[in-house]
Image (cartoon, rainbow, N blue to C red):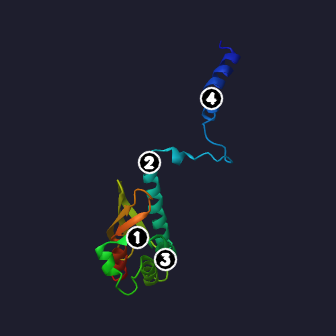
Amino acid sequence: MIDRRAVMTLAFTVLVVPAVRAQRFQDLPSPDSSRAPFLTRARPDSIRMQVRGLIVMQLLENLQQVRGAAIDGDLAAVKWGPADELSSALPGCRTVGAAISALASRLGNVTHLKLFFANVTYADSTTDIQVIVDGAPATVFEVRMIHDRETMSLKELTGLLSGICGVVRQ
């Protein structure tokens, strides 16, 4: 017959010890320390990728929530592509913020647009995005972002303003 203490010891070893080991000290700074967080200890390419992802998601959120002023503030220093320059001369399409507001009012003054990013591709300092605007009919257009490698700010944007203005004019 198997000893009860042996079974308990085996169960303790199998169930409790791995859980305790998983909770051991992970070399993380305490919340009140001034030690740099993990992101700044990552490789520079990894940091750039994370920052670009944050920029893309912030733009998506602002577009979906029809935050025209926030979009225009984020894109104030951006150089636009040729098609976007032409679109900015159209009424209601002077800026991306104005165009997204015009699109929201055209769809019945909605406060949340069914706008999605698909096939987001990061390569060196560029980000390629497929934008899908759900409506009748759904519209798909391509956007290219070029980021400054030093400041990680958005430097050039092609296709966003012309794509949104195209949806507004449908």
Q: How many marks?
A: 4
The residue shown at (67%, 47%) is: 31
Q: Which residue is mark 3?
A: 68
The residue shown at (60%, 29%) is: 18
Q: Which residue is mark 1?
A: 78
Earlier-in-chain disc, 4 versus 3 = 4
Is 141 placed left or right of 68 in the picture? left
Q: In the image shown, does 123 or 151 lie closer to the viewer?
A: 151
Q: What separation in Å lies between label 4 and label 3 (alpha carbons)?
A: 54 Å
Mark 4 lies on a secondary structure that is helix
Amino acid, disc 1: Val
Q: Which residue is mark 2?
A: 44
Q: Which residue is mark 4?
A: 15
Mark 2 closeness class: few <14, some 14–19, many ≥20 residues within 10 Å: few
Which residue, as the protein is rendered here, is positioned at the far top? 1
Where residue 3 appears, as percent x and y from the top left, is 68, 14
Is 112 rendered above or below residue 108?
Answer: above
